Amino acid sequence: MYKIAPIFDDWDKTMVWSCLQGYMGNDWVDDIQNPKSAQVLVGDVSFFAGAPNLDLVKNIPDYFTSPSILMVPRSNEWGEIIEQKYNGNYHRFMRYAFKKEPEAFDLERLKTYINKLSAEYSIRKIDEEIFNRVLRMEWSKDFCSQFSNYDHYKKLGIGFVIIHNDDIVCGASSYTVYNNGIEIQIDTKEEYRRKGFALACASKLILECLNKGIYPSWDSANIESANLAKKLGYHLENEYVTYDITNFK
């Protein structure tokens, strides 16, 4: 890993850190001894840095079973290769990265978001039962999908769900982990959206992370998620290009 770390220097992506620091994910290079190009794949996201390389852009390992893969290029040149290789099978969109500012959060405001939940809803920490339940549902599986089992999650992960009549309706959890931080995965069951549940659940996770000295990193795939982040206290750092690739097999 020390050989490819310089290739990713100054790229503030926690999922890349997850791989470089040995927590999760895999990487490939153009040359083992003297790499100039590198690919990091964590979860459903593949990051490319260094000298643009078609072979790495073509590299989607056999173990990858998701119907689509996200590709994040470090440069326009990488993006051009991705577009040429997957012509007609990609959707190009912008994601939103947020600054990492531990002191930016208004803790009392986060607590008020939690307290607005009505009594019929409860927030519960993800334990072994919840871990297994969220993995069985398509909309919630990514709360825990990057962990090999519950013991792995218990050791490194952290998360909460909102329960209504024993139904999991919302969750916020660690999609990935890195040194002293997590990348947040958040979602709400479709029929329960726009009711403040994501705001409450994310607030609970952020407060718990800060209490443990863990940074709750946030990265948004759409405007709705970006607006939620801003409401929680995050500040936008930049936008960056991402490709959603389908029909790649």
Image (spheres, helix red, strand yellow):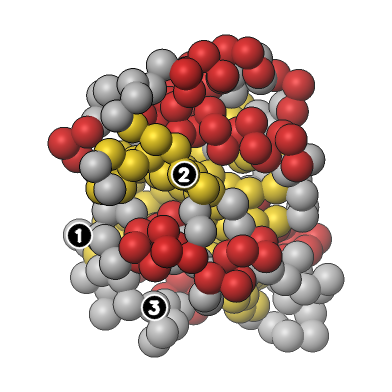
Tell me the residue that label 1 is attached to.
88
Residues 67 and 116: in front is 116
The residue at 79%/79% (across/down) is 34
Tell me the residue that label 3 is attached to.
64
Tag 2 or tag 1, which sits nearer the N-term? 1
The residue at 67%/65% (across/down) is 155
Residue 114, how many percent across, how many down? Answer: 48, 23
| Callouts 1 and 3 close, C-beta under 8 Å | no
- Compute the Cα span from label 1 to label 2: 43 Å
Name the kind of residue labelled 2 in the image. Arg
Residue 69 in view here? no
Residue 209, how many percent across, how many down? Answer: 67, 40
- Compute the Cα span from label 2 to label 3: 31 Å
Q: Secondary structure at mark 2?
A: strand
- Compute the Cα span from label 1 to label 3: 21 Å
Tag 3 or tag 1, which sits nearer the N-term? 3
Residue 36, how many percent across, how many down? Answer: 71, 70
Name the kind of residue labelled 3 in the image. Phe
Residue 65 in view here? yes
Name the kind of residue labelled 1 in the image. Gly
Tell me the residue that label 2 is attached to.
124
